Image (cartoon, rainbow, N blue to C red):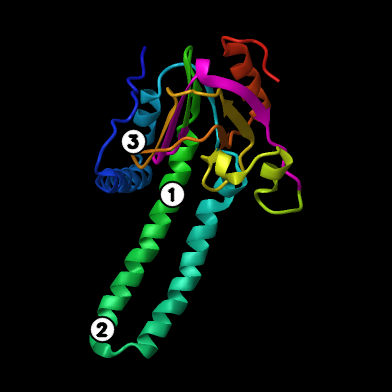
Amino acid sequence: MTDGLSPPASSRLAGAAWLLGAARAQRWMWSETWCAWTRRPLPSVRYARRLGEGQRFALQRGSWMSVLVPMVVFSQFVDVLIAQGVIHVSVAPAHRAAWHGLLAFASLWMVVWAVSLRSATRRVEHVLGPHALTLAIAFRQLCRLPLADIAEVRRIEHKTSGSGKDWIERCGLRPRDVTVLSPLDPPTLLIALKDGATSAWWTRNGAPRPLRRWIAVYVDQPDAMRAAIVEALPVAAVP
């Protein structure tokens, strides 16, 4: 079975491509949440099948993903009650309805975002195929790395203290040389591309983005994924 993934076509209207991808992501987001609440087949399951066959590595046990929905729902419940009270007191009566409606929609959007992100992250996994590694972060980010372009794979160790990106300095890298795919959870795996690699690509919201030499991504079992990648590489000598 082939996955049907192909490099994104270059476009002179990069802004239009991004807006189209963002609109598509919004559609996926609302559809995912609606299907989860109504117990219908999830769009994320269909999306995961498109990534092809191979070894799959989950990314659902990250610290953010485990608390995202309860935290967002609780915060919205508390903050919205306070904000609605402030609007009722401080906004002119003629404008209260509009402000109440806008606040209610923003609160609903936050809950839908959290539910859809958690649902999609629990079902969309990284896929190691026979010829390429596909890194997928829910619906928004997709990265395709041909195995022939991978030079090195490292485990990222995080210390309990320090800044969230202190691992970049410990690895001897500069932030401008690293593409961080994980938007919330600290990345646990670092993948280096070979010099001159041109076949790898990355999209965010469907729009192509420049891919740097080092790619950092979160995965639940980084050691297992690293071992699998190293075994699948055409060149066996990997640090």
Residue 115's label in the rendered image is 1
Judge whether residue 229 is colored magenta.
no
Q: Quadrant of the N terminus?
A: top left
Q: Answer with left or right where residue 87 lies relative to residue 59.
A: left
Label 3 secondary element: helix
Identified at 57% across, 51% down, the residue is 67
Where residue 44 appears, x then y in whole percent? 38, 35
Q: Is residue 213 above or below residue 105?
A: above
Q: Inspect this view and state whether residue 42 appears.
A: no
The residue indicated by pointer 2 is 95
Q: Is residue 108 above or below residue 2?
A: below
Q: Nearer the viewer, mark 3 or mark 2?
A: 2
Mark 2 is on which residue type?
His
Residue bounds of the magenta highlight: 136-159
Identified at 36% across, 86% down, the residue is 88
Identified at 30% across, 77% down, the residue is 99
Label 2 secondary element: helix
The residue indicated by pointer 3 is 43
Judge whether residue 158 is colored magenta.
yes
Q: Nearer the viewer, mark 2 or mark 1?
A: 2
Q: Inspect this view and state whether residue 189 appears.
A: yes
Mark 3 is on which residue type?
Pro
